[in-house]
Image: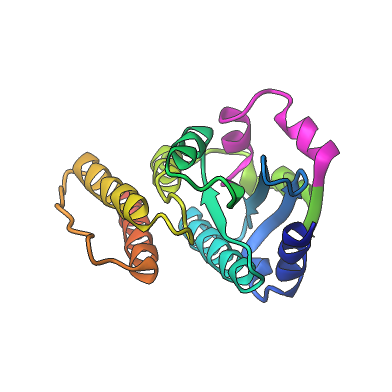
């Protein structure tokens, strides 16, 4: 379908692919289902850099799709997908953003046969799944849970659900700063998409800084 091909071509033309260790798609375009966008960290980059690369990739893809006349809604979990349906976006292309830091991160968040399934069903657009066997991808990081929590709440990037997206980014910042012992109150009512992305990256950087202490 056109949207699937648009994503394929966009990633092939993307000039920052090497910021990720792997990019692939699982499934086919169907308005009743979602496309799984799979990305895995480049072992030479930090987890913080990986999140930035993932956010930049999604921003690039949603803009490309919008130019081709396709409204995309990117979500990190099935629970958020349900929320998306409640917010009346039945015709939007649903893109499930599956992104991972290391092999334990993949195994810990998915069924035992997940790796086997994606090796059989994925459509590789950049890199190889062998990146998961790299020596620097075998151990989890103690900040993985916080990074994953931040990613789960980077909701609906590039979508028309601006109020809901701002609400989730605000929740991310307030909950994570509270967890880190530096609580922050956020007023995001006037934030546009660029501001949401920048503030999300700021909270990810804060997590990284706390991990270095």
In the rendered image of this protein, does residue 131 appear above or below residue 19?
above
State how the image is colored. Answer: rainbow
Whether 179 is among the magenta residues is no
Query: Quick check: is 120 in the magenta stretch?
Result: yes
Residue drawn at (47%, 42%), measured in percent from left and top?
84
Image coordinates for residue 24, horizontal then vertical, percent: 74, 52
**Which is more toward the observer, 61 or 139?**
61
Which quarter of the rendering shows the N terminus? bottom right
Can residue 127 be seen here? no
Residue at 58% from the left image edge and 52% from the top image edge = 92
Residue 145 x/y as whole percent? 42, 37
Q: Nearer the viewer, residue 35 or 132?
A: 35
Position in image of residue 103 (x %, y %): 64, 38
The residue depicted at 74 percent of the width and 34 percent of the height is: 115
Residue 150 in percent (x, y) is at: 39, 47
Q: Which residues are drawn in magenta?
A: 97-122
Q: Residue at 53% of width from left, 53% of height from top?
A: 73
- The reply to whether residue 174 is visible in this rendering is yes
The answer to whether 184 is drawn above or below residue 196 in the figure is: above
The number of discs equals 0
Compared with 56, 111 (above or below) is above
Q: Is residue 157 left or right of residue 163?
A: right
**In the displayed structure, does residue 31 sit left or right of residue 164?**
right
């Amino acid at each position: 379908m056109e949207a699937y091909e648009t994503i394929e071509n966009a990633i092939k033309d993307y000039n920052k692919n090497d910021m990720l260790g792997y990019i692939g798609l699982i499934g086919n375009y169907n308005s009743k289902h979602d496309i799984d966008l799979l990305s895995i960290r480049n072992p030479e980059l930090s987890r913080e850099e990986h999140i930035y690369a993932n956010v930049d990739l999604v921003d690039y893809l949603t803009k490309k799709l919008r130019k081709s006349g396709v409204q995309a809604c990117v979500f990190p979990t099935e629970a958020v997908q349900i929320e998306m349906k409640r917010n009346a976006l039945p015709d939007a292309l649903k893109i499930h953003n599956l992104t991972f830091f290391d092999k334990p991160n993949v195994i810990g968040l998915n069924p035992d046969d997940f790796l086997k399934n994606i090796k059989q069903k994925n459509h590789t657009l950049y890199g190889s799944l062998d990146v998961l066997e790299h020596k620097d991808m075998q151990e989890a990081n103690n900040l993985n849970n916080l990074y994953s929590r931040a990613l789960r709440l980077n909701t609906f990037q590039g979508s028309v659900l601006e109020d809901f997206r701002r609400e989730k980014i605000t929740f991310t910042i307030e909950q994570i700063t509270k967890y880190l012992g530096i609580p922050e109150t956020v007023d995001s009512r006037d934030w546009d998409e660029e501001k949401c992305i920048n503030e999300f990256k700021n909270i990810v950087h804060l997590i990284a800084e706390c991990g270095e202490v």
